[in-house]
Amino acid sequence: MYFPSLRDKWITGLIWGITLSGVLFPLIKGQFTTMMIMIILGSFLLWFWFRTGYKIEGEKIKVYYGPIRQTIHIPEIKLILKSKMPINSPALSFNRIQISCGKYDVVAISPQDREKFISALLDIKPDIPIDERLMPHNKK
């Protein structure tokens, strides 16, 4: 099951603003070589916007963050917390969940349908400790 990333409006504006201004300003000035370079760089940046999501397959979560791929083994998940930390992570929103797995690995992600995502994880590994703030009866 695929879960696209939640996208904050300001992050969307930032990504699209940088991409469009990087292409339009050289176009207006007639700098076509610069414009072509910016189209390539802008396409790379938009790759993150269009291709950030999380796919649950079997006992794995496949994390897609533009060209970056990561796999989380669900049986190794130790804890799921609510997080708003602005760390570098495969998320397009600050409304994140933090997954602790393995010995030192922590991944912060932001699935659009967080409740359904957590429910899918609990179907696979029902004993995952989950932050109470993520439970449906504690919405804030």
Image (spheres, grey):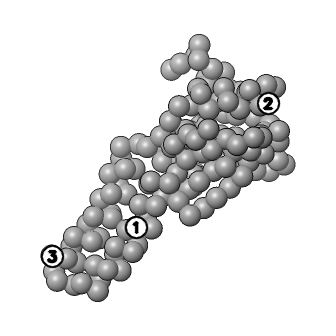
SS assignment at label 3: helix
Residue at image x 51%, y 43%? 5
Q: Quadrant of residue 133?
A: top right
Residue at image x 56%, y 56%? 65
Asked whether, in this view, residue 71 is left or right of residue 12, the answer is right
On residue 43, the disc is 1
Above/below status of 42 relative to 70 = below
Residue farthest toward the top in the current orientation of the protein: 137
Residue at image x 29%, y 86%? 33
Q: Is residue 97 visible?
A: yes
Provide residue 97's location: percent of width, then percent of height.
61, 37
Find the distance from the CA under tag 2 to the CA under tag 3. Answer: 55 Å
The residue singled out by tag 2 in the image is 125
Question: Quick one: label 2, few (<14), some, or many (20+) residues within 10 Å?
Answer: some
Provide residue 64's location: percent of width, then percent of height.
59, 53
Asked if disc 1 and disc 2 are in contact, CB closer than 8 Å, the reply is: no
The residue singled out by tag 3 in the image is 28
